[in-house]
Image (cartoon, rainbow, N blue to C red):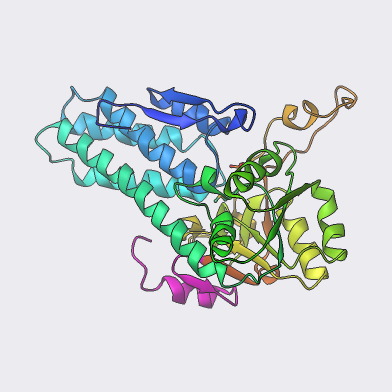
Amino acid sequence: MGGIDGHLRLLDQTRLPRAVFEIDCHNIEQVWEAIRSLRVRGAPAIGVAAAYGICLVGKAALGVSPAAFVSAIEAGCDYLATSRPTAVNLFWALQRMRVLAETAADAAHAEEIAVSLLREAKKIQDEDAETCANIGRIGAELLRDGDGVLTHCNAGALATCGDGTALAVIFAAHRAGKRLRVFADETRPLLQGARLTAWELVQYGVPCTILCDGAAAHAMKEGLVQAVITGADRIAANGDAANKIGTYSVALAAAAHGIPFYVAAPQSTFDLSLSGGESIPIEQRPPGEVTGVSWPAPPPELEVFNPAFDVTPARLIRAIICERGLIEPVTAERIASIFATAPGK
Ligand code: MRU
């Protein structure tokens, strides 16, 4: 997005890797749809897209009084908050935009607030790029030359404004000369692993093998995997971490094989208002995502269980790789202490 009269251009992730296709969002409804339908996806990227979505609300309300402008921004935040429920980065970014608008409400013109909102959205974007770099630097130390690293879903550049979270760790270790092979779970039903993670790794020149989600435990048993790293969508105060459905199974399998399971996530993914993972809202997605892509098709009229996320309990997580540092052991006390001096939360 250029100036306050601009629009939001997004890479449509639903079409990758077959087509590299960009979509232009000119209003908040288009941003809502892009988030809901996973054209833009991954917790940090959702937050940044929402922040720019609020700038589009501002663009549409430029002619009104500052008070009416702020009301429009507040309504926009409420509306975008309904797009997806699990990734807390969405609500975190919207809250930043809301607070900024409310504190600027005494401005002489709505345009001044609009300029501040755009600056804030760019700041959220830039901070995320820096956060990814720090996560990569901190996490790369955990990987050894020759490791097989399993990941689930996509926590890469597509999901953030930088190198990603889990993939930033892998990219940083790769740049440091460590020879890795990444095992990317295909990640049913929407195949973020096979479509997006594999696409990123191939472009980066990191050796990559994709596998069916159900093959992960077997790959571990066969000695192919020395570490698991995933991203997260929301982490409770005790370290329980929500991530793409299937992550919990991977963590259980890693524990059974004595393989370290790491979560890489920024501070904006922590929801310290929740004491444990049982309070994290789990998005249920349409049945067609499960039935529509398999062949031969399952019998019609079938009941479908399609939760988009699950929660991995803190006890299964060896460490959380955060830009503030390595959180190990994953306990409420360690999490509280690492954020005690942190800005912004
Ligand atoms: O449904 P998605 O594709 O938005 O789910 C994304 C994930 O689960 C990612 O692992 C998570 O958001 C972390 S992205 C850095």
- Residue 338 on the magenta span: yes
Q: Vertically, is 156 above or below 181?
A: above
Q: Quadrant of residue 342?
A: bottom left
Residue 33 rendering spot, x and y as whole percentages: 51, 27
Q: Quadrant of residue 263?
A: bottom right
What quarter of the picture does the N terminus occupy? top left
Q: Answer left or right for 70 relative to 264.
A: left
What quarter of the picture does the C terminus occupy? bottom left
Residue 340 rendering spot, x and y as whole percentages: 39, 73
Give me the residue at 25% from left, 31% from top.
Answer: 3
Q: Across the whole image, how many numbered discs are drawn on residues?
A: 0
Residue 326 visible somewhere in the drawing: yes
Residue 344 rendering spot, x and y as whole percentages: 34, 60
Q: Answer left or right for 116 relative to 236.
A: left
Q: Vertically, is 311 above or below 282?
A: below
Residue 238 visible somewhere in the drawing: no
- Residue 310 on the magenta span: no
Q: Vertically, is 186 above or below 76?
A: below
Please report the bounds of the magenta region as a residue range. 322-345
Give me the residue at 81% from left, 46% from top.
Answer: 212
Q: Answer left or right for 195 relative to 300.
A: left
Q: Answer left or right for 31 relative to 185.
A: left
Q: For this rendering, which residue is in front, 222 or 3?
A: 222
Q: Vertically, is 105 above or below 26?
A: below
Residue 269 rendering spot, x and y as whole percentages: 50, 56
